[in-house]
Amino acid sequence: MAILTYAFLLTFAAAAALTPWVGRFALKSGIVDHPGGRRIHRKVTPRLGGAAVMAAFFIGFLVFLPQLSPNFRPGQLLIFSLTALFLLAVGFVDDKRGLPPAVQLLSHAVAGVSLAAAGMAIEEVTNPFGGKVALDQLQVAMPFDAGGRMLNLPADLITVVWVVLVINAVNWLDGLDGLAAGVGGIAAVTVALLSLSAVVGQPHVALLALLLAGSIGGFLVYNFHPAKIFLGTVGSTFIGYVLATLAVISGGKIATAFLVLGFPILDATTIILRRIATGAPPWKPDTRHLHHLLLKRGFSVRKTVLFLYGVSAVFGLTALIAGTTGRKVLMAAVLAVMLAALLVWLARPVAKSAK
């Protein structure tokens, strides 16, 4: 417990110290968000804050590498780190100049492929009715890396889809001050608590989760409304990537991960289905996310973010107390129906006087 506490405090302090410096760099480099359009802030605000989150995370990562490395196969942590640097480069270009959605989506898929190539794939899932379901039954006779690993289906494909889904769920959540970072932090803390439970018993996963939670906490000091700096693509992508990885390395606990990330995943799924139903491209930005709908109903930015923190915490608490996979699936379905009903109700036209 002492190591876990030090890990959280170290990355919290590192992020709190680095974020102002990153903000000044972003302002001087012109990596900023201007008011107008879908943006609700009223002044020029630096982006790139996620670089501070990532730097703080890897400071702690290097400090606690001796505790982490025995729990991974040779090369896995290196590939995890190099993939994060790749996403940093792509995110930096997007924050600076903007990139087409297809290019960003491709980079997310590359991240998923990298994890699968390193042997960090969702190889099995728990059957809600008992037992395990293996996902690596079909092996394609095609070298997947220098070590001669074969392509396992559908495990590797599911891993890629999972990484893409989680990264985009967090990315699309980044529409209000502190929202994506706060929800990501709640998810990371939930993963840490689950990993420390007697049933799971994975302290190395808890250590990685708390490194992320501390990094996000130090950044939130400057990102909560009114934000002095934004995560940017760098930050939302990195948080989503680490959360997706944590779910994979914890033994493919997809039901748990869906509960922990239930709110952003459901919001993203609803948006995609709505856009497809109306004939719009799934990646086309709009103002139909849950946080936009709450703002239209008269919620302030701060109240909207705190309300959604509460929603995320309820999903996380459910993951902690649900117990068996069957119960998690059932409770996830109940929460999903309730949140979907809320989304439908909020989407109704409303007179200004009724807000």
Image (cartoon, helix red, strand yellow):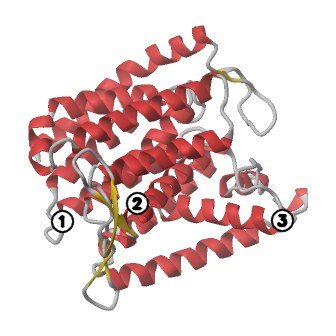
Where's residue 309, x and y in %? Answer: 50, 54
Q: What element carries label 2?
A: helix
Callout 1 crowding tier (Cα within 10 Å): few <14, some 14–19, many ≥20: few
- Foreground pick, 154 / 261: 154
208 sits left or right of 353 in the view: left
Mark 3 residue type: Thr
Where's residue 162, x and y in %? Answer: 45, 60
Q: Which of marks 3 and 1 is nearer the N terminus?
A: 1
> Does the rendering let one see residue 273?
yes
Q: What element carries label 3?
A: loop
- Disc number lying in front (3 or 2): 2
264 sits left or right of 298 in the view: left
Contact flag, marks 2 and 1 (Cβ < 8 Å): no
Q: In this view, does 77 lie above or below 169?
A: above
- Foreground pick, 225 / 238: 238
Where's residue 65, x and y in %? Answer: 15, 36
Where's residue 232, x and y in %? Answer: 56, 32
- The residue that disc 1 covers is 197
Q: In this view, does 223 lie above or below 205?
A: above
Picture residue at 74% right of the left edge, 27% below the top = 42
Outermost residue on the top side: it is 28
Q: Distance between the residues labelled 2 and 1?
A: 25 Å
Picture residue at 40% right of the left edge, 70% below the top = 154
- The residue that disc 2 covers is 159
Q: Earlier in the sequence, mark 2 or mark 1?
A: 2
Residue 221's image quarter? Answer: top left
Q: How far apart are marks 3 and 1 (CA)?
A: 44 Å
Callout 3 crowding tier (Cα within 10 Å): few <14, some 14–19, many ≥20: few
> Does the rendering let one see residue 185?
no
Mark 1 residue type: Ser
